[in-house]
Amino acid sequence: MKERKQPQRTCVGCREEKDKKDLIRIVHTPDGEYLVDPGGKAAGRGAYLCRSAACLEKAFRSEALSRSFRTHVPKEAQEKLRAEVKALVGE
């Protein structure tokens, strides 16, 4: 039986291409919220990050997350995302 090809996505922090299942999806919902989307199915504009807090920090510093969402990510949302990603990856 032929093995299915895994979809690839690029981390907005380090710009490395990886399997979609190995990355965390961050979503900007139509309601204006910024969430970590562990299931990868939430409605809204998504961006992918490696499972590390360091890549999230790189994405904030370089404004890559803001470019992906086509809007500025407010400080309050950045703090919330930091806490959620750290809880998810165990850092």
Image (cartoon, rainbow, N blue to C red):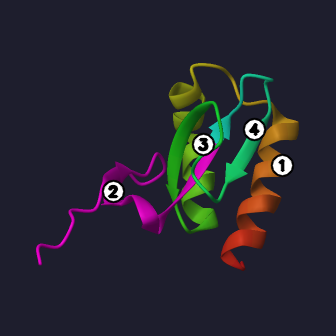
Front-most of 64 and 32? 32
Helix, strand or loop at mark 3: helix
Q: Is residue 32 left or right of residue 23?
A: right
- Give the side of residue 16 with respect to residue 45, left or right: left
Q: CA distance from mark 3 to mark 1?
A: 13 Å
Q: Residue at x 60, y 29 (%)?
A: 66
Q: Quadrant of the C terminus?
A: bottom right
What residue is pinned by disc 4?
34
Q: CA distance from mark 2 to mark 3?
A: 17 Å
Contact (CB < 8 A) between labels 2 and 3?
Answer: no
Upstream in the sequence, badge 3 or badge 4? 4
Q: Are marks 2 and 1 in contact (CB under 8 Å)?
A: no
Q: Is residue 25 magenta?
A: yes
SS assignment at label 4: strand
Kind of element beneath mark 2: loop
Residue type at mark 2: give it.
Glu
The amino acid type found where label 1 is placed reads: Glu
Circle 3 residue: 61
Tag 2 residue: 16
Q: Position of residue 46 (x, y in %)?
A: 55, 38
Q: CA distance from mark 1 to mark 4?
A: 11 Å
Q: Disc 2 or 1, which lies upstream in sequence?
A: 2
The residue where tag 1 is placed is: 79
Categorize mark 2 by other alpha carbons within 10 Å: few (<14), some (14-19), many (20+). Answer: few
Q: Nearer the viewer, mark 1 or mark 4?
A: 4
Instruction: Choose top left, top right, bottom left or bottom right for residue 60.
Output: top right
Q: Nearer the viewer, residue 4 or 26?
A: 4
Up the image or down, 88 lies above or below 81; here it is below
Q: CA distance from mark 2 to mark 1?
A: 24 Å
Q: Which residues are magenta?
A: 1-26
Quadrant hosting residue 17: bottom left
